[in-house]
Image (tube, grey):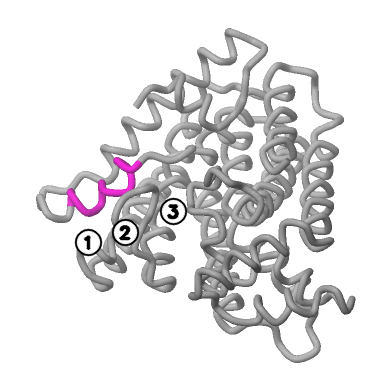
Amino acid sequence: MSYQSSLLAVGIEFDDPALEATVRDGLQVIESALRAAVHSEDEFVADVARYLVDAGGKRFRPLLALLAAQFGNADSDGVVMSAVVCELTHLATLYHDDVMDEATVRRGATAANTRWTNTIAILTGDFLFARASDILADLGPEAVRIQARCFERLVTGQIRETVGPRPGVDPVDHYLSVLADKTGSLIATSAEFGARFAGVDEQTVSCLRDFGEQFGMAFQISDDILDIASDSGQSGKTPGTDLREGVQTLPVLYALQATDPAGSRLRELISKPLQDDGEHAEALALLRSSEAIQQARHTMLQYAESARATISGLPDVPAKAALQAMADLVVVRSG
């Protein structure tokens, strides 16, 4: 992997060459440690465990850990390995997600559950969780506690998503709270680990953790928007994939809540999976021109602005500008 290309894929342009070099070098060290962490003496286990590592990814979580560490002693022990823990956890959840979603493709390649079996994919995710726990044991009891609480949120979010909103609960509120647990929590933990192992003060740790959660929310909502608004598959999926599968993302939920007569046809279409190509195209066109997509953009912008606000009082070091650029990127990428 080219780490210059990786940073460009994330979309951040560093104004500070020294910071860019530091982050690039840090990502390279993390990548090597990540590959070492998924190694197994059993060749088959090693191949399956390495599958999603080889598939690539933006490595947002390690990147955020490295940037958060810049507010303290970035060379401190634990920064790199805590970032590896978060990325291993993220990869493990992808193996499990693909089983639950019955996915056939992940990051442009055949999903592990399709290439092998659901059982193999589930056990591989468990294997990665085990490796993350092994690394955590060397990082100390506080790191174990932080990761355990994060993992609790990940699982709780997945359960709540599976069950759906309870009677009387606003579907949008439910969706956003699930998003906070499933996506925001691990990104927040990545920032917290980077800051905490760099020895920064508790107030700064809190600010960076909050930035991670708000940024994670904004980024996921921008993916929801791109799935509908993009013509080029910027989200890494064919546009309208969620819509075709009947997945109710934020723009769809807003559209379903609308009461205007003009939106009745859209509500009729999106209340079910859209396997018919004609109906899918019609629904996609209606959503793209709807008020619902603008509502989703407004919500995404609120989270991005909140992310920026959480770090506004931090020292004006180059890493702060890079984090602000990440928040700006979310807004730009979703139009």
Mark 2 closeness class: few <14, some 14–19, many ≥20 residues within 10 Å: many
Residue at coordinates 83% horizontally, 45% vertically from top-left? 306
Q: How many marks?
A: 3
Give x and y (percent) for residue 240: 56, 60
Where are the magenta residues, as a range?
A: 46-55
Marks 2 and 3, how far apart in space?
17 Å
* Callout 1 amino acid: Arg
Q: Is residue 191 left or right of residue 288?
A: left
In this rendering, the answer to whether 76 lies above or below 202 is above
Q: CA distance from mark 2 to mark 1?
A: 6 Å
Q: Earlier in the sequence, mark 2 or mark 3?
A: 3
Quarter of the rendering occupied by the N terminus: top left
**Residue 52 appears left or right of 218:** left
Residue at (38, 72) in percent of width and height: 102
Tag of residue 303: none
Element class at badge 1: helix
What whole-number distance in Å separates the C-alpha atoms at marks 3 and 1? 21 Å
Q: Is residue 53 magenta?
A: yes
Residue sitting nearer the eye, 143 or 211? 211
